[in-house]
Amino acid sequence: MGFFDFLKMGSTASGTRPGESTDPDKLRDGSPAKIQEPAKLLALIITAVSSDDVVNFERLCRKNVDMIESNYLVWKNVPEALRGNEHEVQRYVTAVIAIAEFFQRFLGKDGLMSALAGPAETNPIKIWESYLAAARKDLSNMDFVSAENNLRAGISLGDGMQGPALKPLLSVSYGLLGQTFFHQGRAVEAFDLVLKAQTMCQEENDVQGVLAYTTALYQITRYSGHIEEAAACCDAMAAVFSSGGQVNEAAAWTKKAAEVRKGEPLNRVQIVINGVTKELDELEGIELTDVQMQFQFKRNRITPTAAEQSCKNGIILGMNGRFEDALKAFELASRMDPYDPDPHYKKAFTLLQLRRYDEAVDEFKTTEKLAPGWYQCRSDRWLAEQLQSKRYPHSVFDALCYLADGKDDAQKKLEKTRAWIEKHPDFAPYHFFLGKQLQEQNDPAAAKDAFLKALSLAEDDDLKTRTLVSLAIIAEPGEERLGYLEQAANLNGNLISAAMAKVMLSSRTVVA
C-alpha cells in the first residue's frame, strides 16, 4: 500500500508501534514535532513521505500549520538544485502533493490544493481534462485519428505525476483510447488498453468504472472470437451486480454467459415488444393487441464504428450513381471489419447495378456465410444467379428496384406490375408484389390468388417464407392460417418472416 492509500484511509497518528512515542507533540524519535525552520520542516516532511512514515508526517503537518501555509507557495516549485536528479524530484513532488492532500482531506483547508493546481492554463490536470473533452468530441464525430492524438497527449502528462487524480485520469484515457482503437478495427490493441483501464478501476474500487470496462472487454473478446474470455467477463459482471444486490442484472449477465459458452449463432432474429427485447424461444401465449413490436437482427459481434460509417458512405455514393466509388467504400468497410455481412450485401447490389453478376453472386454467398439469412440475401442471390445465367434480362432487376422503392401512385405501380407479368409470367417476385399491391387496395381475394401464384412459382425459400406469411395475414383464423404459419416457421427461408410466423403461432387469438 502506497502513501496516498494511507491518506485515503483516514487519520493515522494513533498507528504507533510498541515503545514509540504516543505524544502528538513529538515525533517517533521523541524530538519535538513543532519545527522553527521552514527548510528543516520541509526536509522532515519529505523524509516522512518517502519512507511511508505516516505518523511523523501527520504530526509535522498538524503542529506546523501556520508555517506550512506561509511557505507553501515557495515549496510547490521544485528547487533548481534538484531538477537534474529524477529520484529527488520524485521525492520532492510526492511530498508537496501529500501536504496539500492532507490539508484538504483532514484539516478542511483547500488553499494549498488550489495553490498547487495553479491557473488552468498551466495546471497539468486541467490540461489533461481538456484533452479528454476534445477526445470525446472527436469520438462523437468519428474522428479517430484526432481522438488518439488528444488521448496520447493527455497520457504523456501523467509521466512523473503522483497523487489521487492520476489513476482516474489514466483509466479514462486508456479506456477511451481502447474504444478509439476498437472502432478502427484494432481489437487486439484495444483489449490491452481497456484491460489496463479495468485494472486501475479495480485498484481504486471504482465499481462503475469496473462495470464499464468489463462490458467493453466482453464486447472485444466476443468480437475476437475468444469465447471463454467473453463468458468470463459476463461472469464478472454478474458477480459485481450480485454483490450490489442487483439480482435482475446479475441474472441477465449469468444468462448471457451461458449463451456465449453455448455458442451464439452468427445471425438471429430478436423481437422487441414495448421496448423489451426477447428471444423467439421466450414467447408463449403472448397477446399481440395494443403492443408495439419490431423485429431486429442480432449478430454475435458488434460492428466497429469506422466500418459502419464507411458502409453508410458507400450507400450515399450508390444513391448518387457513383457505383465504382461506392464499391471502394464497401471494400474499405469489409477490411475494417471482416466479420460484418453488410458491406458484402451492399456491394453485391452495387455489382448488380453494374451488371457484374458473377461477382455479385460471390458477394451474396459471402453475406450468407457471415450471417445466414441476412435480410433477403437468399432471394437476392437467387436473382443474381438468374441474371448470371441470362435466364432473365437485367430489366427484371430494375423492375424489382422500382417495386421496392418506386414513388409512383398505387394504381400506376399496379399497371406496371401487370405489364411486367405479361412479359415474364413465370417470374415469381412479380406475382408476390402484385399480391402486396392488391392487399393494400383491400382486395384480399385477388391478393390471395397472386400470392398463391407466387408460391407455386417461387424457387427460393426466402420468397416462399415471405409469401406464406402474407397468405396467413389475409387468411381467416383457423386451419388455413395455421397451416401457412407452420409452413413459414418450419421453412425458415426468410428469418424475419419466419420470426413473424412464430410470434403469430404463439398468440392464441391469431390462430384460433
Image: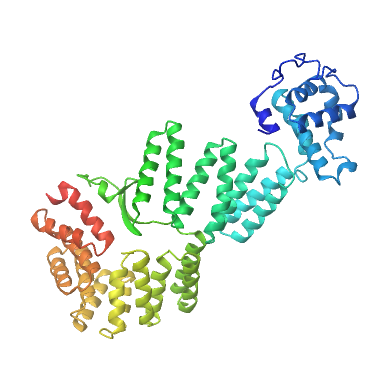
What is the basis of the colouring in this image?
rainbow
Give the image location of residue 139, x and y in percent.
57, 55
List the single residue furthest toward the front: 19
Vertical relation: 124 (above or below) 74: below
Determine if residue 372 is in view.
yes
Residue drawn at x 21%, y 82% as measured from the top left: 424
Tell which of 456 and 17 is nearer to you: 17
Determine if residue 140 is in view.
no
Vertical relation: 327 (above or below) 136: below
Residue drawn at x 48%, y 46% as measured from the top left: 215
Vertical relation: 162 (above or below) 382: above
Describe residue 390's horizontal placement relative to residue 242 as left or right.
left
Residue drawn at x 46%, y 68% as measured from the top left: 334
Give the image location of residue 264, x and y in percent.
35, 54
List the single residue furthest toward the top: 23
Give the image location of residue 38, x and y in percent.
89, 27
Tell which of 425 and 2 is nearer to you: 2
